[in-house]
Image (tube, rainbow, N blue to C red):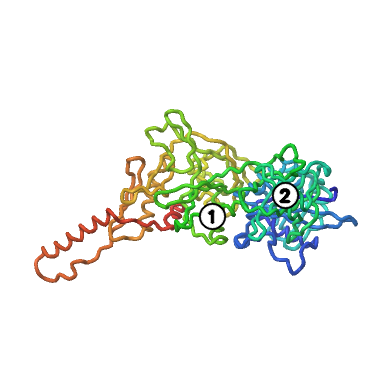
Amino acid sequence: MKHIRNFCIIAHIDHGKSTLADRLLEYTNTITQRESQAQLLDDMDLERERGITIKSHAIQMDYIQDGQAYVLNLIDTPGHVDFSYEVSRSIAACEGALLIVDASQGIQAQTISNLYLALEHDLEIIPILNKMDLPGAMPEEVKDQIIELIGCKRDEIIPASGKTGLGVHDILRAIVERVPAPKGNPDGELQALIFDSVFNSFRGIIAYFKVLNGEIRKGDKVKFVATEKDYIAEEVGTLKLTQKPKDVIKTGDVGYIISGIKEAREVKVGDTITHKERPSSEPIKGFEEVKPMVFAGIYPVDTDEYEELREAMHKLQLNDASIVFEPESSAALGFGFRCGFLGMLHMEIIQERLEREFDMTVITTVPNVSYKAFTSKGIEIDVHNPSDLPDPSKLEHVEEPFIKANIITKSEFVGPIMSLCIQKRGTIINQSYLTSDRVELIFEMPMGEIVFDFYDRLKTISKGYASFDYHQIGYRQSDLVRLDILLNSEPVDALSSLIHRTNSYNFGKKICEKLRELIPRQQFEIIIQASIGAKIIARETVKALRKDVTAKCYGGDISRKRKLLEKQKKGKKRMRQVGNVEIPQTAFMAVLKLD
């Protein structure tokens, strides 16, 4: 046990975690020259294309220092604020963390929040200054920032470069010397923490775990505590680049278990594995329940595919435990699911993965956050969907979730960022200068305002220099109304949204104008209206396509033409009563990008 080191890599998005992980694998000869490729641990096409890590990946390396062999378990983590749940799981399975900071960009918001996560779990932090080979690197300034943040000594910071391989041997040496060996009782009852799971169509569900106490052998009868199901460990092993079967996984090590589990619901991430005969008295603590921030409906384009979509969602949930969903139905779109996501990027990724991995074409409705509505009788209702909001006459007040946003930026962008936050109903709490030209701004603002385009706009106005991180601080009362969109006086529930009264007129007008451009013209007139309750606040009309019915009349009395036009008018009127308006998927997505 004293020769095992478990560590993870934490950093802000795009500071070079995956590249540095590649170098570590290369220098410990875990991968051969032939297997090596850039971002080796990012095995989804989507991760490679976008250059982001979406999933945490575990891999084991063998390293020899001063004639002694060590086993290093590395868990590579995502850096984007939407995937901080993945990071919290990886941290729970480690004793140390490499904190990577880009030498040309310095410390950013997500670095700080991930660092606090690691410190809460008492991990040993090894600070690393990455991208030292860049011409724009500012090592001395960034070292000052790191020292101020974690209070380490200047010579403890390791300069490195994932591209050239500078400093990789120093990092490996530091991991062995500074990261504590795992603690635990090798002779105690088995306690293993599940920190991830994947679906394999041939072997069923494979769970990844870390053994805290005891040991697990091939053929053992094991029990999953949360679901109270028993299984036989058909195969256990360690995670090299491919899975390596072993006879036994001992205390402190990380491994996988295959036990022929078919049902996605039977594996809960954060669950404890123990022996059936000698169960451990209590499960392992330390996982936070996932809190979805953004809710949206996902519907199959073809209603017959509802069951297939359910299967696909279950398989996705195995691979990504942070997605939450429940069935719902909509008058406009039929049966589908109400899904909870961690943020807009997460939602986009899930939609993309459904299309790529499961070949499902889906319609996503306008995302919103969850609200609390209080009726005049004092009953509290959780509102995930605007259509759940009670009638205004029975409504006492509505509360919406607020967040504390932490923005770090260069001082020249403070003005535009402040005006963006104030426009989004934010109030500034604090402004502090980290260095002479880096400012940390702390705002409190409604969660609903940052759901759509806040992150993109923040990046645009700060030329990509501002970094952003947030956490929830509870619910507060605000003046929210439900804005409904009517097509030919029929409400389209998938387009309705909850919005602050001051923004509702502008928003309603913009949506109507946008829909007028996007809805294809029909043989009859389509009236698009935005309403709050019974009050119409905006209206646009999609003109009817007209066929020239009078073309066959030449000459003769005007009444002949009028008779034909009257007949057409009657037909149009009847058409408008029975006609259906198809709303294209672009219309749902366009609502998100109104500004």
Residue underneath mark 2: 209
Report, in whole angstroms, how far the alpha carbon at label 1 lies from the one at label 2: 29 Å
Residue closer to the observer: 452 or 589: 589
Give the total of numbered labels. 2
Residue drawn at x 38%, y 35% is 392
User: On the picture, is 1 further left or further right than 125?
Assistant: right
Q: In the current view of this chain or complex, which residue is farthest to the right?
A: 67
Residue 467 seen in render: no
- Locate residue 499, reporting x and y percent: 44, 42
Residue 303 as seen in the image, left or right of residue 43: left
Q: Tell me residue 239's x, y (percent).
A: 74, 57
Residue beneath label 1, please? 348
Give residue 311's quadrant in the image.
Answer: bottom right
Q: Is residue 29 visible?
A: yes
Q: Residue at x 20, y 61 (%)?
A: 568
Name the residue rendered at 48%, 32% in the picture. 380
Q: Nearer the viewer, residue 47 or 308?
A: 308
Furthest residue toward left: 557
Residue 577 position, x and y percent, is 27, 53
Q: Which disc is residue 99 wearing?
A: none
Q: Residues within 10 Å of mark 1 (few under 14, many from 20)?
A: few
Using the image, determine if residue 33 lies above or below residue 236.
below
At label 2, counting other C-alpha atoms closer than 10 Å, the crowd grade (few under 14, some 14-19, many 20 or more) is many
For residue 18, side relative to residue 1 (left or right): left
